[in-house]
Image (cartoon, grey):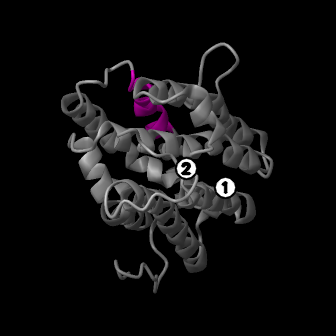
Amino acid sequence: MSTASTRLTKLLAPDELEAALRQIGATRYHNLHPFHKRLHGGKLTRGQVQAWALNRYYYQSRIPAKDASLVARLPTAELRREWRRRLIDHDGDGINPGGVERWLKLAEGVGLGRDYVASTDGLLPATRFAVDAYVHFVRDRSILEAVASSLTELFSPNIIAERVSGMLAGYNWITAETLAYFTPRLTQAPQDSTFALNYVKAHARTVEEQQQVLEALIFKCGVLWSQLDALYLAYVEPGMIPPGAFVPER
């Protein structure tokens, strides 16, 4: 397999497929993006961190929608129960808050108004476009491709640890309570990714299916990367904030 094109020429053994997926993460995951390097290195202004929190909220808030669309298509109760747990993780259970609520707390912690963030009025157009494309991908593609697109969670525990330590060290106005969103994800993400990885390895039985799995993960990495491209262009360099998008206070 060519790392550059990820074009398969033969059927991979399950462990070889896993290695190919992990190689995609090693070269395409958004921890490598210059915006994240600045975020984790304490090199962003308060307004730039606010722009990240506001735009990332839209991604967090739409994850339950894409998961619900997949639950509706899953063929067995066992699979539906497994994926339904993700809905609870993000939406909460009515008593315990989920990830979407915790992200709103994060946004408040960096100085944004809760109602403003939840309205998505200040969203970058590219953020909305990228996130909606991901929701539509999961809704419209095969179950195998939809599951494979979630495999960016294989790589998230490392970026979470880097993000929390870096932001606490780099911004004296951010507290551990502000970043409490990430604590449950350190256990939820590995649980989710282990199930999804095992599913993909068991169900991608042809070269074509394995190719679809690799391309689904590449697509998802692109969704995450493009969101940071938009943030960098609007709020770092050259600073082209689109009409209607959030403008940090000077």
- Residue 96 at x, y percent in the picture: 61, 15
Q: Amino acid at mark 1?
A: Val
Name the chief secondary structure element in magenta.
Answer: helix
- Residue 17 at x, y percent in the picture: 44, 66
Q: Which residues are magenta?
A: 178-191
Residue at the (36%, 44%) spot, across then down: 48
Mark 2–mark 1 distance (CA, rounded to whole Å): 17 Å
How many marks overall? 2
Name the image quarter holding the N terminus.
bottom left
- Residue 93 at x, y percent in the picture: 68, 20
Relative vertical location of residue 121 with respect to residue 219 in this rendering, above or below: above
Judging by the rendered image, the residue that carries numbered circle 1 is 135
Q: Residues within 10 Å of mark 2 (few under 14, many from 20)?
A: many
Q: Is residue 210 magenta?
A: no
**249 or 139, nearer to the observer:** 249
Q: Residues within 10 Å of mark 1 (few under 14, many from 20)?
A: many
In this image, 249 relative to 96: left or right?
Answer: left
Judging by the rendered image, the residue that carries numbered circle 2 is 196
Considering the numbered disc 2 on the image, is that residue within a helix, a strand or a loop? Answer: helix
